[in-house]
Amino acid sequence: HGATVGQLDADALFYLRARGIGAPEARHLLVRGFASEALSGISDDALRERLLKSSLARLGEGS
């Protein structure tokens, strides 16, 4: 999978929407997955989780 800065993968969004997942939840899942992958190299679990929560909050994705 590729990383495109600034835009969600339209195919992935379509896939989730086609399976009955609402647009806001589908977007949240994709953003959370991208952020989790971006932070996966951090070995400290507590730090990684804090950074994930902070990143999602800044992106307006909450929890």
Image (tube, helix red, strand yellow):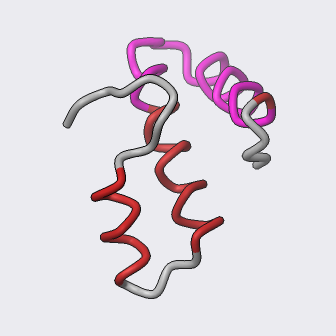
Residue 49 is one of the magenta-drawn residues: yes
Q: Where 20 sits versus 42, above or below?
A: below
Q: Nearer the viewer, residue 7 or 24?
A: 7
The structure residue drawn at horizontal position 47% and vertical position 37%, both measured from the top left corner, is 7
Residue 42 is one of the magenta-drawn residues: yes
Quarter residue 27 falls in? bottom right
| Direction from residue 46 to residue 21 in the image, left or right | left
The structure residue drawn at horizontal position 39% and vertical position 13%, both measured from the top left corner, is 41
Q: Position of residue 19 (x, y in %)?
A: 37, 84
Considering the whole magenta stretch, tell me its main secondary structure: helix
Q: Where 10 sits versus 45, above or below?
A: below
| Direction from residue 3 to residue 50 in the image, left or right | right
Q: Position of residue 58 (x, y in %)?
A: 79, 28
Q: Nearer the viewer, residue 30 or 53?
A: 30
Pick the quarter of the image with the N terminus: top left
Count of labels in the image: 0
The structure residue drawn at horizontal position 76% and vertical position 26%, both measured from the top left corner, is 54
Q: Position of residue 40 (x, y in %)?
A: 41, 22
Outermost residue, bottom side: 20
The structure residue drawn at horizontal position 32% and vertical position 27%, both measured from the top left corner, is 3
Q: Magenta residues, as a range?
A: 37-57
| Direction from residue 2 to residue 44 in the image, left or right | right
Q: Where 21 sits versus 33, above or below?
A: below
Outermost residue, left side: 1
Q: Position of residue 17 (x, y in %)?
A: 43, 76
